[in-house]
Image (tube, rainbow, N blue to C red):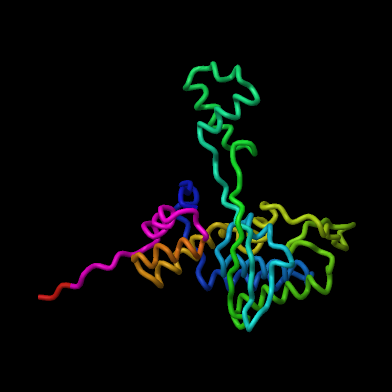
Amino acid sequence: MTNVSLEYKHRELPTDIDIENMLKAADKIPDPFFRLRAKALLALFKKFGKRRKELQLIEMNDLKVENGLLLVTFNLAKKRKLGLFQYFKFLKKTSPEELNKPQTELVAQWKLWRETKEGSHFREDRRTKSVSIEDKYAKLILEYYEFMKNKYPDSKWLFPSGKSIFGTAYMIFPDRHLKGWELWYIIKQLDPQVWCHLFRELKGSEVVKEKGESLESLFSVKRTLDLSSVDVAYRYIDRLGIQKMRTEVQ
């Protein structure tokens, strides 16, 4: 999130201790499905820094283990808001009389339209990431994945939707995935001060710390977070990087 609101802009990124405490909170969840799900979701956010939408869309078939590696294929879900020209084309097809309104009014309507389904779309693409199966977070993902294969073999989604039955059982909907706010709620239950996109910031900061303020860092941030352009990657580096000054001796 490169254009963050003031409410979130100055929040501290979660530390290793924060994440360990969140895992401990998950361990207190009595039901094994909810417990393993919470830990796997947290592990995916931490390890890959993906958007909520991209975790929603993980299918069971998107996880594989090959040559000691956990492979996870993500559907990229970068939302792109359409421009003013596209809005004019939309009006020409749907409500041509609207084009006669003053420019200031059309611009105001366009800004509202960009928040609708018609005024934006998600970039569709797929990327595969890998991590050693010995990684602590990969183990949490795999534990939940194996549980899902055994308990809910018909589920299409890694995080299927469901509902509680009489407060004593939980029925999943194998053809429907959880909504974004439901993933957010799972994370909030582990730590009310942590929000999902902070893990994306955290992953970007990890890359910047490893690579420094360099051209390599620029492309590494872009590739790691699957950003749309190096311009967006630069904003991560500009915000999260610590510039190293030249040492001068007397």
Q: Position of residue 240 (x, y in %)?
A: 40, 61
Vertical comparison of 102 with 223: above or below: above
Q: Is residue 182 left or right of residue 234?
A: right
Q: Position of residue 192 (x, y in %)?
A: 60, 58
Vertical comparison of 30 with 99: above or below: below
Q: Residue at x 40, y 62 (%)?
A: 218
Q: Position of residue 102 (x, y in %)?
A: 49, 17
Quadrant of residue 199 in the image?
bottom right
Asked if the magenta segment contains residue 207, the reply would be no
Vertical comparison of 230 with 64: above or below: above
Q: Residue at x 34, y 66 (%)?
A: 214
Q: Is residue 22 left or right of residue 15?
A: right
Quadrant of residue 32 in the image?
bottom right
Quadrant of residue 64 in the image?
bottom right
Q: Residue at x 44, y 68 (%)?
A: 207
Vertical comparison of 12 with 210: above or below: above
Q: Quadrant of the C terminus?
A: bottom left
Give the residues in magenta. Answer: 226-247
Q: Residue furthest left?
A: 250
Q: Position of residue 183 (x, y in %)?
A: 67, 57
